Amino acid sequence: MEGTGDCIKTIKIDVHYQESADPLEILYRLIWGIVFFVIFNVLQFVLLAFAVLQFLVIIAKKRRSPRIHRWTRAIYDCFCQNWAYVFGLTDERSPLLPKF
């Protein structure tokens, strides 16, 4: 399973290789990465709150909340897409904030 992106069966990551690159894009990626790093650190507290809420919902209702799951998934999707851009895996810029 080396490098296939499918080490977890229910999560798929698909990043296409692009050979061309603009030198100014590196500077832009650095700035984008710093801004995104700050935003995602704030969002980590939101994720922690979601995890606690989901835990309480599971204890109370014996099932997961689909809304909390959807919000958590949106934040992690945004995280993966932005870091793929910052690390140069793709030239596609995604929004800094997740779409809920």
Image: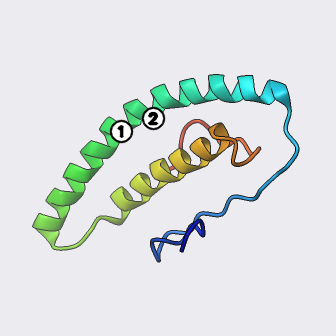
Horizontal and vertical percent position of residue 13:
59, 63
- What label sits on residue 40 in the rendered view? 2
Could one spot residue 38 in this view of the protein? yes
Label 2 packing within 10 angstroms: few (<14), some (14-19), many (20+): some
Question: Residue drawn 64% across and 22% down?
Answer: 31
Q: Residue most toward the bottom?
A: 9
Q: Nearer the viewer, residue 76 or 23?
A: 23
Total numbered labels placed on residues in the image: 2
Mark 1 secondary-structure assignment: helix
Question: For this view, does 22 lie left or right of residue 89?
Answer: right
Q: Position of residue 29 (x, y in %)?
A: 68, 30
CB-based contact (under 8 Å), mark 2 and mark 1: yes
**Figure check: 5 above or below 86:** below
Q: Quick one: 100 or 79, which is closer to the camera? A: 79
Q: Is residue 37 left or right of residue 88?
A: left
Q: Is residue 55 left or right of residue 14?
A: left
Instruction: Say which element carries label 2.
Output: helix
At label 1, the amino acid type is Gln
| Residue 81 horizontal/vertical position (percent) | 60, 48
Here the colouring is rainbow
Query: Would residue 50 appear left or right of 74 to someone viewing this image?
Result: left
Q: Work out whether residue 99 can be spotted.
A: no
Q: What residue sits 29% from the left and 49% below the top?
A: 50
Residue 42, position as x, y percentages in the image:
38, 30
Rounded to the nearest angstrom, the CA distance separating label 2 from label 1 is: 6 Å
The residue at the point 71 percent across, 41 percent down is 93
93 or 19, which is in the foreground? 19
